[in-house]
């Protein structure tokens, strides 16, 4: 279900939120990953179907809040969480960061809170994971100042300035689901890093421009828009193979350098 032409077998799907450290604002989390709250939220039916379809394995200490603590960061002191979208594997830890402003797409939050429980589960959303005060803590990408992206990011040209200082630029990556955005960050160690969330599930899929089957992308979002976004990421990667692409579920951390010509 994740790679067109791939074999039919269960695959491990790491879920990897990213911790960024801003010089003034302190720790900023991009997505929150799984947490024990996922187990609670998927106890009743219909939410239990989510757990059956994508079983979670979370060894102790590997949720984002515990990992923050192990780095000397108190989760209650984290002031910013940036969400790519509202699928449960991206937001399950949200309640562990109660003081954080929640930066997200208005379209994403609207879709995540629309309709009844069955409709939410079918859309990959577990309503019980969303903080009760999310409406007052949310700050929407669509309402942030629009800024031009560095030329290194072409064909992507425009982003939303999340903190107002140009350090975190949210970039819409349509197709995976309504309101799906990535984050372009100038990483002090590795240069530009494009956190592309679920716009692709591996760097290899970007390198070869190979989307998941239409059945998968059509079920979750729009196959046409997903493939247009993947195609744009492919062009970006061919033009600028040094730019780091970080898929949320990618096991491959470093950019895959094309060996010779890229098809
Ligand atoms: Zn997703």
Image: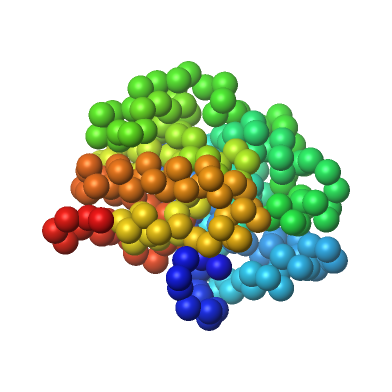
| Residue 160 spot, x, y in % from top left | 46, 26
Position of residue 39 in the picture relative to residue 259 (left or right): right
The quadrant holding residue 111 is top right
Number of labels in the image equals 0
Which residue is most to the left?
A: 260
Q: Which of 103 and 23 is in front in this view?
A: 103
- Mark yes or no: residue 29 visible: no
Which residue is most to the top?
A: 145
Q: Which of 75 and 90 is in front in this view?
A: 90
Position of residue 23 in the picture relative to residue 11 (left or right): left
Q: Nearer the viewer, residue 168 or 202?
A: 202
The quadrant holding residue 50 is bottom right
| Residue 188 spot, x, y in % from top left | 25, 41
Residue depicted at x 53% and y 45%: 224
Colour scheme in the image?
rainbow
Residue depicted at x 57% and y 55%: 217
- Mark yes or no: residue 202 visible: yes
| Residue 40 spot, x, y in % from top left | 76, 64
The quadrant holding residue 215 is bottom right
Q: Quadrant of the N terminus?
A: bottom right
Residue depicted at x 39% and y 66%: 251
Position of residue 57 in the picture relative to residue 125 (left or right): left
Q: Which of 137 and 157 is in front in this view?
A: 157
Q: Quadrant of the C terminus?
A: bottom left
Which residue is most to the bottom?
A: 9
């Amino acid at each position: 279900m994740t790679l067109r032409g791939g074999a039919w077998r269960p695959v491990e799907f790491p879920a990897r939120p990213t911790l960024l450290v801003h010089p003034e604002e302190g720790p900023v989390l991009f997505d929150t990953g799984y947490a024990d709250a996922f187990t609670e939220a998927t106890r009743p039916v219909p939410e239990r179907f989510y757990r059956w379809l994508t079983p979670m394995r979370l060894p102790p200490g590997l949720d984002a809040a515990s990992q923050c603590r192990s780095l000397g960061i108190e989760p209650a002191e984290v002031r910013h969480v940036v969400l790519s979208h509202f699928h449960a594997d991206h937001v399950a830890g949200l309640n562990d960061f109660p003081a954080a402003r929640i930066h997200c797409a208005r379209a994403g939050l609207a879709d995540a809170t629309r309709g009844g429980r069955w409709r939410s589960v079918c859309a990959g959303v577990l309503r019980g994971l969303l903080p009760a005060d999310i409406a007052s803590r949310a700050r929407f990408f669509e309402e942030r100042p629009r800024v031009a992206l560095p030329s290194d990011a072409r064909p992507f040209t425009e982003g939303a300035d999340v903190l107002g200082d140009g350090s975190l630029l949210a970039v819409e990556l349509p197709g995976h689901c309504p309101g799906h955005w990535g984050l372009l960050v100038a990483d002090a160690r590795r240069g530009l890093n494009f956190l592309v969330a679920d716009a692709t599930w591996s760097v290899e899929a970007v390198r070869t421009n190979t989307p998941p089957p239409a059945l998968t992308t059509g079920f979750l979002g729009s196959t046409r828009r997903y493939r247009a976004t993947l195609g744009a990421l492919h062009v970006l990667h061919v033009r600028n193979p040094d730019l780091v692409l970080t898929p949320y579920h990618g096991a491959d951390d470093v950019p895959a350098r094309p060996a010779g010509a890229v098809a």
